[in-house]
Amino acid sequence: MEAAKELDIPNTSVTKIARYFEQAGLVDVDYKHLKGPKIKFLKTPDSDFKNQTETDLINKMKFYKSFRDIESANKLILKLYNIVVHKGDDESKKIYKAVHKFYTDNFMKQLVDKKIKEPVTSLDKYYFDVDKMRIEVNIIKQEMEAVPFYIISLMKLSDVTRLVIDSIKEEVISKITFNLVFQSHEEEYMVKKEYKIKIMRLMKEVFPDLTDEVLQMYSDYIVLTSLGMGEVELLLRDKQLEEIVINSASEPIWTYHKKHGWLETNIVLEDEAKIMHFATLAGRTVDKTITTLSPLMDSHLTTGDRVNATLKPISSQGNTITIRKFAESPWTITDFIKNGTIDYVSAALVWTAMQFELSALIVGGTGSGKTSTLNVFSIFIPPNQRVVSIEDTRELRLPKTLHWVPLETRMANPEGKGAVTMLDLVVNSLRMRPDRIIVGEIRRKNEAEVLFEAMHTGHSVYATLHANTVHEAITRLTTDPIGISKSLLSAVDLIFVQNRNRRNNTRRTYQIAEMLEEGNFNLLYAYNFKKDKLLRVNPPKAFYKTLEVIAGLTKAEVDSEINDKIKVLKYLVANKINTTEEIALLIKNYYVNKKYILKKIIGGKNNK
Ligand SMILES: Nc1ncnc2c1ncn2[C@@H]1O[C@H](COP(=O)(O)OP(=O)(O)OP(=O)(O)O)[C@@H](O)[C@H]1O
Ligand SMILES: [Mg+2]
């Protein structure tokens, strides 16, 4: 009945709610009780300090103190803090204040000298909408905890409502069965629509007095979290997140935030089977399977987000899923110049290299932006050329102006058949008469050999490689497991190194080098941390020479090419032209009629 009061719903509905609770095994209901159904909670909707007194909580803190268990104390204080933030009633505030005092006096004082005013600080708070739902995100830093917390919740959802919703969700899921794998956005849309209609009908029965708007919101929440990846779906909709990481069911999901870096979320999955289920779903959309026999999987979701999954016991702590979110709109050279990733001169150098068919490697550490950079640079390819790209999972997005054939590898099916490897595709691409070959990542000897052969026979190749510096890239290429001969390396013209600064989470071009004979290199630019700038190290040698041989350009002509391109790039930045298609169109026109474009741009009033 208390629940009914909180939700402002009539007693008749309580019986219905009670039935759901009963079926969910949460309560025991005595329907024959004189004053209406009497509900006995088998499990309390506990998990906060609603039913605990100030003394209970302080005792808990004392217990933690005796075991020097700061982790549990931190968890408790964070929980209280969240309740105060959400409810803000006087009783909660009073309890929080008392427990907080005990906590700072006993746990904090010994650890830090300066007086800590607030053990929990809010770093950020924002909202985003998913269908009819308003989702709230709180990012919180706690003293003595290395990693801040990312707390996501549906706004205005009390514990009781959540319990009702969860029971309805279970009820509905057990009744409705359909193929959970959607082949297309349209199919997904139709299934969800049908499902939502059914849920709305049920919700109306349970909550006859709630407005349609609120019912819609709850129904959307049920649809979203019961199809697909449950609450992970909420994380997938937060555009601020770059990566979502599930390490096992025994720890919360982690996420990499654009602004705040690694954060621990408030979402914990029930069990390992759930993670396995999500991994299976993520694989099925693109025909990839994950089983105990083939426990590693690369895949992507219909939204383009890249997914990697591993199963126990290969990942010994539990099943894992790593999701790299697909940037809403691909990065462009305009964005890169604006956010300081690269400067005008280097960008113009890359452009010139791309125009005149020089080959290049883009190297960097994990998540340093290699694939994004490869995509940004590919737009400089002239439109009259045939581009074949080869990736394990498709990430590249090239503009319509290019003549592009994307290829993707495939793993073997459970019977061990049907695999299409990177080597298969590299070899095949050479028969497709490509002018340019773009390869997601070089990992193995045989594919590297074929690629370097292709470069030697006049194809331009662009690929990424995992290494932190030019030097390291060369070592990686020439030692096992890649281990190609040093003499082959000179086929690459340029090497770009991308770097992610772990402290402030910025990404920068770290080195640009040209390859010389016999696996030696000449460093052209290097990033200076103090100045936050790419500085010139040596003047190019091979670069000019190659352009002279390939395109018959003198040094002065190459420099003039670079200068013209700087003008175009400045125009892009000044006019905020930052979509792939717009930039591609301008580049196409530049190739078709450079004089006209330069004249138009130089004469244009927006040019600086
Ligand atoms: N120059 C940049 N500035 C800001 N963010 C960037 C930049 N380049 C890439 N990112 C972001 O960094 C993340 C990683 O980018 P990307 O996938 O290109 O890296 P990667 O080096 O290819 O990663 P992996 O090693 O996993 O293949 C993405 O979320 C992307 O949007
Ligand atoms: Mg990559």
Image (cartoon, rainbow, N blue to C red):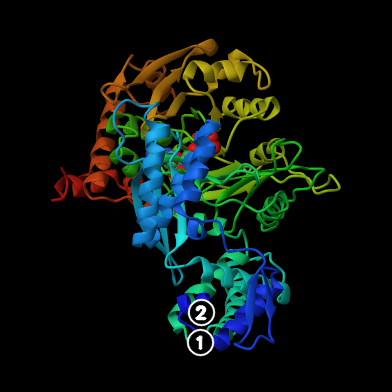
Choose between 377 and 9: the one closer to the eye: 9
Any part of residue 326 in sight = no
Mark before the other along the chain sequence, 2 or 1: 2
Do the numbered discs 2 and 1 sit on residues whose CB atoms are within 8 Å? yes
Can you say whether 295 is above or below 54 in the image?
above
User: Hey, what amino acid is under mark 1?
Assistant: Pro
Graded by Cα atoms within 10 Å as few (under 14), some (14 to 19) or many (20 or more), the crowding at tag 2 reads: some
Report which residue position mark 1 lands on: 10
The residue at the far front in this view is: 55
Residue at x-position 29% and y-position 28%: 114
Q: What distance separates the C-alpha of mark 2 from that of mark 1? A: 7 Å
Tell me how many marks there are: 2
Q: Amino acid at mark 2?
A: Ala
Image quadrant in which the C terminus is located: top left
Name the residue nearer the viewer: 222 or 324. Answer: 222
Q: Residue at x 71, y 74 (%)?
A: 23
Return the residue at label 2: 4
